[in-house]
Image (cartoon, rainbow, N blue to C red):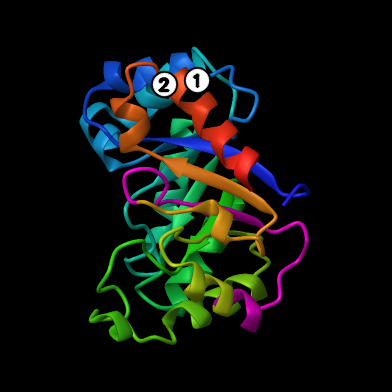
């Protein structure tokens, strides 16, 4: 996998802004950092503008917003969602369109009108998500989402490290462009292994709990990258 591009995205999924700031300040200069993921915990507790301002004091890397999970509302709410993120200074947004295709199309359009990068996910890391795993959603759901997102020009996707066989099957059914980007949760505490994804070339690894709990986040990230690249 020598031609594979790995980058890292700390997931700042915590309530304490100072806890998040500690991680941001520690890893802001890492050569393989892609950006930072912000979720509802910081956003609802402190307000997105304040969270983005904190990150901007240390880094100009992309700030990705993951509402856990966005695009599960009516199509018309996409415009308000996009405007809210734009005004806060967010650069990219993750959508998990469990509300259906009309919502997905509308929210993609709304985000693009605000010049926000669109990232679409269809499979989560945990068990009991799809019906075949004991969940609620049809097994055909990921393929339907992936096809519609690609038809709308989306080139960035969330794929879970914990389900490599499912992701490989999904991408086999939907051949991807070399420029496609993949954002993957499941590294660290959830035990996902990016080495099981040789079919993904531009791979951004999202890591939360392991990095937040590390006494030295920069040293943790250095070691994780060495271990991954050295054994890939």
Q: Could you tell me residue 107's position as x and y percent?
A: 48, 62
Residue depicted at 57% across the width and 33% down the height: 225
Left or right of 97 on screen, residue 119: right
Residue 37 location (% of width, % of height): 44, 38
- Whether residue 62 is visible here, answered yes or no, is no
Disc number lying in front (2 or 1): 2
Instruction: Please give the residue where the numbered disc 2 appears in the rendered image.
Output: 217
Mark 2 crowd level (few <14, some 14–19, many ≥20, 10 Å Cα)? many
Could you say which is closer to the camera, residue 211 or residue 87?
211
159 vs 82, nearest the viewer:
159
SS under mark 2: helix
Q: Name above or below for residue 129 compared with residue 64.
A: below
- The image quarter in which residue 112 lies: bottom right
- Tell me if residue 39 is in the magenta stretch: no
Query: Is residue 74 something that shows in the picture?
Result: yes
List x then y, in percent, for residue 44. 24, 36
- Which residue is at 69% across, 59% downward? 180
Q: Which mark is residue 27?
A: 1
Q: Residue at 56%, 79% (x, y): give it.
A: 169
Predominant SS of the magenta segment: loop
Evaluate if marks 2 and 1 touch, with contact meaning CB atoms under 8 Å apart: yes
Q: Residue at x 37, y 51 (%)?
A: 191
For label 1, the SS is helix
- The magenta segment: 170-190
């Amino acid at each position: 996998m020598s031609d594979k591009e790995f980058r890292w995205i700390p997931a700042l999924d915590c309530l304490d802004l100072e806890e998040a700031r500690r991680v941001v300040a520690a890893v802001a200069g890492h050569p393989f950092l892609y950006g930072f993921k912000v979720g509802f915990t910081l956003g609802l507790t402190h307000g997105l503008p304040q969270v983005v301002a904190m990150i901007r004091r240390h880094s100009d890397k992309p700030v990705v917003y993951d509402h856990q999970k966005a695009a599960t509302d009516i199509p018309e709410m996409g415009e308000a969602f996009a405007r809210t993120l734009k005004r806060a200074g967010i650069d990219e947004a993750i959508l998990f369109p469990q509300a259906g295709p009309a919502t997905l199309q509308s929210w993609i359009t709304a985000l693009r009108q605000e010049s926000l990068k669109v990232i679409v996910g269809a499979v989560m890391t945990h068990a009991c998500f799809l019906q075949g795993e004991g969940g609620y959603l049809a097994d055909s759901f990921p393929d339907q989402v992936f096809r519609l997102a690609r038809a709308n020009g989306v080139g960035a996707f969330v794929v879970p490290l914990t389900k490599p066989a499912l992701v490989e099957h999904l991408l086999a059914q939907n051949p991807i462009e070399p420029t496609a980007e993949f954002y993957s949760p499941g590294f660290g505490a959830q035990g996902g292994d990016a080495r099981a994804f040789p079919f993904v070339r531009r791979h951004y690894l999202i890591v939360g709990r392991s990095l937040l709990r590390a006494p030295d986040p920069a040293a943790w990230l250095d070691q994780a990258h060495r271990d991954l690249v050295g054994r890939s």
